[in-house]
Amino acid sequence: MTTPRLAITLGDPRGIGAEIVRKALADPRVAGACRWVVVGPSGLECAADEVIGEWHPRQSAANAGRLAGKAIERAVAMARSGDVAGIVTAPIDKHALLAGGYDYPGHTEMLAALTGCDVAMMLSSDRLRVVLATTHVALRDVPALLTGELIARVARVTRDGLRAAFGIAEPRIALCALNPHAGDGGRFGREDEAVLAPAARASGLLGPFPADTVFVRAMRGEFDAVIAPYHDVGMTAIKVASFGSAVNVTLGLPFPRTSPDHGTALDIAGQGKADAGSMIEAILLAARLAGRSGG
């Protein structure tokens, strides 16, 4: 059986992307799971197979963002053309991406725009799966964004993704509440009672359940995934449970896309001490998902 071919981007050239990709590709598990084409600029410690420009350490953050954005565009184009079966993306810096001409809050939103697909951001590990209903927005804006329509859309993408990508025929999906104690009958906010509970019923979700118990229940096997109402409640849960081994998965794309569960780590870049564990897991998961989809 032919192993799937993946496009692996190097991320922000100032960060640890090239280091963790180089270390990951040297891991025998990765070598046995897939073939790859590295996409990024020249001038980094991991050589790019598909070169999208040249990087010099004295270049600006804006140029770093421009090169990172070009690598994502190239990887997506390769996946859409069938040249690769999936993509794995190293971390990017959102400020640099914007300065480089790409007005997206992160990978998820950029991938949605490049493909025209309805997507959702999932963090997955062997202990927990968390999907974000809202992603990179201010906390004060979250309540207005949590509409029944949004919950229905995220529920559909999550259910379809769990079935297609993870082989779960009848996914058990819980909805995490917005307010403490799920609002406690309206005492701590009415959003859970007025918006989230009806949306959960309409979409076949369980809940909403309070944040301080729903993730524990999922880790004990009660749910296959939890939809979190906002970024930090979901990301905190998955990173406490599985930091360094969790994988970011974009659900809803016509091809697998994964990435590690951490950022660019500019503070340790170039020191040779970055942990490639999550990047290894991201590549292995992308290979499994591509194999499941026939890539």
Image (cartoon, helix red, strand yellow):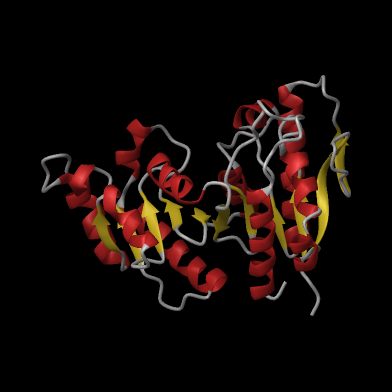
Residue 49 visible in this rendered orientation of the protein = yes
Height in image: 262 above or below 34?
A: above
Q: Is residue 266 above or below residue 189?
A: above
Apparent side of residue 83 relative to residue 207 in the rendered image (left or right) = right
Determine which quarter of the picture holds residue 139. top left
Residue drawn at the location 58% of the way across and 47% of the way down: 244
Which residue is at the front of the view, 113 or 180? 180
Give residue 225's position: percent from left, percent from top.
41, 62
> Residue shown at 64%/62% (left/top)?
285
Q: Quadrant of the C terminus?
A: bottom right
Quadrant of the rendered image containing residue 31: bottom right
Judging depth in this view, the residue of 200 and 260 nearest the camera is 260
Question: At which x and y percent is residue 157?
Answer: 47, 62
Left or right: 49 in relation to 242: right
Residue positioned 72% across, 24% down in the render: 62
Q: Residue at x 82, y 19 (%)?
A: 58
Q: Considering only vertical position in the picture, is 286 above or below 51? A: below
| Drawn side of residue 149 relative to residue 279, left or right | left
Can residue 149 be seen here? The reply is no
Residue 231: horizontal and vertical position, in percent? 43, 42
Where does the N terminus fall, quadrant-wise? bottom right
